[in-house]
Image: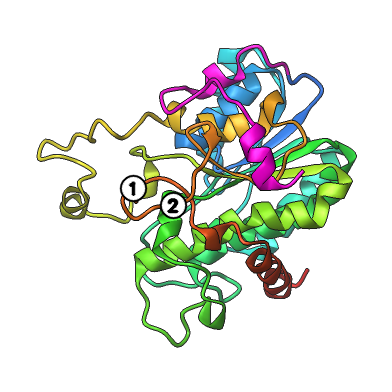
Amino acid sequence: MSSSAAAGAVASRFGADSTALDVIEGIRLEGRTALVTGGASGIGLEIARALAAAGAAVVIADREVALAEKAAAELIGETGNARVAVAEVDLASLASVRLLAARFLERHDRLDILVNNAGIMACPQAYSADGHELHFAVNYLGHFALAVLLRDALARAAPSRVVSVSSIGHRRSPVVFEDIDYRRRPYERWEAYGQSKTACALLAPAITAQWSAQGIVCHAVNPGGSMTGLQRHLTTDELRALGWIDESGRAPARWRSPAQCAATSVWAATAPELGAVSGLYLENCQVAAPWRKDQPMSGVHDYATSPALAARLWAVSRAMADL
């Protein structure tokens, strides 16, 4: 079944107001293992909370180890699930990603759920340890490498699921293959963020093409807006100008809680109704509609779901990550 045909067949009873715990209710994940990047705080913590509450062994992979350890202790105490562990990773370093994968494989022979959640936004121009534009390196390339390095563990757990967290910000730019790393074109931070999130979206059709025969499913997700650490590079004046806070510093009503923004990732990772469908772009616990100019804050651009562009990005990414 094609992704377009499958999209019409998927029915969900959840929506924008659903939380991650709403989505996971009635689902049991004992005997399954999940890895969540950026799981120490914000939306990632809520994803990890839901998976742990359902009984999964959860690995919180984060750059901030102390914060991750605090989060793990919180989840163990809250859920009674002692199988919550911490792993260090810096997604801006492919060497760090390789080390995380190696250590994971030393401890686990299978991986049922991989949630590529960690991310950065609107950073000043900077480059990763491997020389790649920082948004692209952290949001996409490190996660791409992690998935490739853990492919065999995902295959052993088949049917397994990969969740690639994109954003409505993907509307700001396709992947500019001629100059991904901004070596020749002028740097613009929102465009760079958008390019990285388009790449995250393209991981879903790419993995579907490459690995679906091995029982590995992948969906891309727009989590929606919530005030988390993602906004750390923006000043108060910039947040006000964007309409993300009012004069009193409060977020607008259209923004949601981290638990609500975590819901679509948890739905993508666990929902029985998704079955063996793969390669979808999801938002508000539904299959997203095509992006429209008159509704710019929802939907997905065709350049973020193109199988041809996904195949091109896969080949470029393997070369960039030396995989």
Please tell me the numbered disc located at residue 131: none
Query: Which picture quadrant has residue 298?
Result: top left
Task: Estimate the spatial distance between the alpha carbons at disc 2 and disc 1, rounded to whole Å.
Answer: 7 Å
Q: In which quadrant is the C terminus drawn? A: bottom right
Q: Secondary structure at mark 2?
A: loop
Residue 97 seen anywhere in this rendered image of the structure = no
Q: Is 214 located above or below residue 41 in the figure?
A: below
Residue 23 in magenta? Answer: yes
Q: Is residue 319 left or right of residue 196?
A: right
Query: Which picture quadrant has residue 122?
Result: bottom left
Name the residue tied to disc 1. Answer: 295
Name the residue tied to disc 2. Answer: 291
Give the image location of residue 195, x and y in percent.
48, 65
Q: What is the three-letter code of the residue carrying label 1?
A: Gln
Residue at position x 31%, y 51% in the image: 294
Q: Secondary structure at mark 1?
A: loop
Residue 216 seen anywhere in this rendered image of the structure = yes
Q: In which quadrant is the N terminus drawn? A: top right
Q: Is residue 38 left or right of residue 113?
A: left
Callout 2–callout 1 Cβ contact below 8 Å: yes
Give the image location of residue 148, x and y in percent.
77, 57
Q: Is residue 235 left or right of residue 213?
A: left
Residue at position x 71%, y 58% in the image: 206
Magenta highlight range: 1-28
Give the image location of residue 120, x and y in percent.
45, 55
Residue 3 in magenta? Answer: yes
Say which of 208 and 261 sits in front: 208
Say which of 125 and 295 sits in front: 295
Residue at position x 51%, y 22% in the image: 14
Q: Is residue 215 left or right of residue 221?
A: right
Q: What is the three-letter code of the residue carrying label 2?
A: Trp
